[in-house]
Amino acid sequence: MTRPIDHPAAPLTQLQSDLRRLLAEQRTQATVERVGWLIAHPEAATPATAGELAEYRHLLYDADTDATTPAFPYPTQPLEAS
């Protein structure tokens, strides 16, 4: 038989808060370790695919009304089937 706990239990909200903080710290630490490893071993990084590069260009596109350069050239006329 186990001994009963002699001290009052921590409130559930405190335990949940502590757990969220601990998980966030662990995720941050794992990310820092992964980035450090990639910096030390750049040959292990996988290059982006053509689709990923297009997405990155799209995300970097200046979508303001004063933008004069599109993210990548769009054809003005539909391409004819060859």
Image (tube, helix red, strand yellow):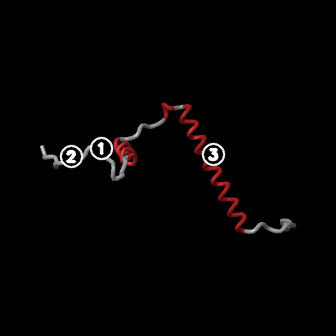
Number of numbered callouts drawn: 3
Please rate how many residues cluster around mark 1, counting C-alpha atoms within 10 Å: few if below 14, some from 14 to 19, many from 20.
few
Quadrant showing the N terminus: bottom right
Q: Position of residue 54 (x, y in %)?
A: 35, 44
User: On the rendered structure, is 75 left or right of 7?
Assistant: left
Q: Residue at x 57, y 36 (%)?
A: 37
User: On the rendered structure, is 69 left or right of 46?
Assistant: left
> Height in image: 70 above or below 45?
below
Q: Amino acid at mark 3?
A: Gln
Query: Between 25 and 46, which is closer to the camera in this rendering?
Result: 25
Q: Position of residue 33 (x, y in %)?
A: 60, 40
> Height in image: 4 above or below 43?
below
Q: Residue at x 75, y 68 (%)?
A: 11
User: The residue tagged with tag 1: helix, strand or loop?
Assistant: loop
Please rate how many residues cluster around mark 2, counting C-alpha atoms within 10 Å: few if below 14, some from 14 to 19, many from 20.
few
Does label 3 or label 2 sit earlier along the sequence? Answer: 3
CA–CA distance in space, label 3 to label 2: 46 Å
* Nearest-to-viewer mark from 3 and 1: 1
Residues at discs 3 and 2 in contact (Cβ within 8 Å): no
* Nearest-to-viewer mark from 3 and 2: 2
Q: Which mark is residue 72?
A: 1
Quadrant showing the C terminus: top left
Q: Which mark is residue 29?
A: 3
Q: Which residue is mark 2?
A: 75
Q: Position of residue 52 (x, y in %)?
A: 38, 44
User: On the rendered structure, is 11 left or right of 42?
Assistant: right
User: The residue tagged with tag 3: helix, strand or loop?
Assistant: helix
Q: Amino acid at mark 1?
A: Phe
